[in-house]
Amino acid sequence: MPRARGRRLLSWLLLQLCSAQDAAGPGELRHGLVFDAGSSGTRVHVYSWKIGGGGSKDSFDLIADDLLKIKPGLSSFKGEPEQAGASLRPLLAYAKEKVPAAAVPATPVFLMATAGLRLVGEGAKDAILASVCDELGKSGFRFRCEWATLLGGEDEGLYGWVTVNYLLGALYPPAKTPAVGTIDLGGGSVQVVFATSEPVPNPDESQLLTFGARQHSLYVKSHLGYGLDEARRKALDSLVSRRAEDKPEPFRHPCLPRGASLEHGGKSLVGDADWARCLRVMGRLFPQPFAAGQPKLADRFYGFSYMYDRTAAIGLLDGQPRQFGSVAMSYNDIAAAGESLCRLSAEETATRFANTQDAAKSNNYCGDVAYVAALLKALGFEGDTSITMTNKIEKVELVWTLGAMLAKSAELLADTGSGGLGAGSVIGGLVALGLAAAALKLLSQRRSYSKLLPSSRRDFN
């Protein structure tokens, strides 16, 4: 589609948005569901928002993000794919408790699966999605089979950036609040997104988003294979392969506390508790240069998922674990605290972190913190650059699903045709944020949200 035609269509979408909001009336409530189908479990986010209420959030004023998660994940139904859809029934029942009965037929449902589902094989994946399609199709909610898809890493990163900056009030004009960059560290990949005024050499890593009259030119990069779970595995592979020929077992693991041990690849490893060596092991996982083609980093960054879970959540700096919250810290802060952490024995580690959510995995904390530090260094952060580690903003969990809800709503608006939108439509009051995602699709022509690619991220770990 020529760029000029794309702009004309975007103008039409904006006109439809305004007309729909006028028809809907002030402060009207809307709902939408996003299923996050991870490798070991599925969660549903039930979003509720108001439109046309006036003020800075006139287009989209988030009221609630109700969440329920269950195990196992859809990929566990590889042997009996016809049962996959039925596993979603508790989540659908929960959603119907949150959405008024009269609004259910107009409430759209999207299911997005991460890499775990692709790993089951093409045939099993298709059979699982067919079962999901059947179950969601008869749920009473608004659903199409093409709304159950696989999620790509770049899309996940972009959705996460949208979520964070929407909640910070950094998307819409006036541009009083600068947009922040985001680092979403998952289990299998890490997503880095930030606004830049510099040209991005690879057009696939560049996106233009428009929110009202405010534009954001973004660098979007998903580093597949550089999530935390992958880092642990690669570090173990490296230690075993480097020592197998000239060292007797057990091998010494610098990232494990003294007194801890584990088996990997048929080899025994014991803890050596050496921060400097551990940091070198993690640093070697990154090719040089790791951030080739990456523009100058933004001034402000927010880190979430494992970035939060292995720093603020475990009380890395102050010994105070936090289930929710925000803590600003730099590479230097993380490195100093990591060095102290890695001096602890296995017994001391278990005692100090007994009250953390992942206490059973506390022997991993030394290596995990070292990986967070090594990642920041590989991305080009200066030692004293502050990064806000958080998992909630305005009481809303920082996950990509909110951004996905808005972007998919934008697709619904684009698909309505010239007939316009009725007041009863769930997208009658679609946000400018959602339209921005439509603008991304129409103007850049670099990615279609209906053709999502596989990704890997942390779910239920």
Image (cartoon, helix red, strand yellow):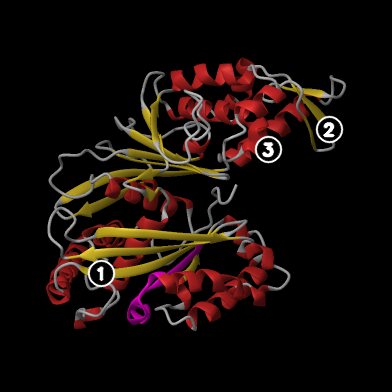
Which residue does the numbered mark 1 point to in the structure image?
29
Checking the image for residue 148, the label placed there is: none
Rendering coords of residue 216 (x, y %): 24, 46
The kind of residue tagged 1 is Leu
Please give the name of the residue rendered at 55% of the width and 70% of the height, measured from the top-left corner: 90
Q: Which type of secondary structure does the marked residue at label 1 adopt?
A: strand
Q: Which type of secondary structure does the marked residue at label 3 adopt?
A: helix
Which residue does the numbered mark 2 point to in the structure image?
267
Q: Earlier in the sequence, mark 3 or mark 1?
A: 1
Q: Give the left or right position of residue 225, taking residue 376 as reference.
A: right
Q: Quadrant of residue 331?
A: top left
Marks 3/2: CA–CA distance: 13 Å
Q: Quadrant of residue 439?
A: bottom left
Closer to us: 395 or 143: 395
Which residue does the numbered mark 3 point to in the structure image?
233
Pair 3/1: label in front: 1
The kind of residue tagged 2 is Lys
Q: Is residue 306 above or below residue 296?
A: below
Q: Give the left or right position of residue 6, taking residue 316 as reference.
A: left
Please give the name of the residue rendered at 39% of the width and 44% of the height, measured from the top-left corner: 392
Please give the name of the residue rendered at 84% of the width and 20% of the height, measured from the top-left corner: 247
Per the rendered image, the range of residues in magenta is 98-112
Q: Earlier in the sequence, mark 2 or mark 1?
A: 1
Pair 2/1: label in front: 1
Q: Earlier in the sequence, mark 3 or mark 2?
A: 3
> Any magenta on residue 101?
yes
Please give the name of the residue rendered at 36% of the width and 68% of the height, measured from the top-left corner: 32
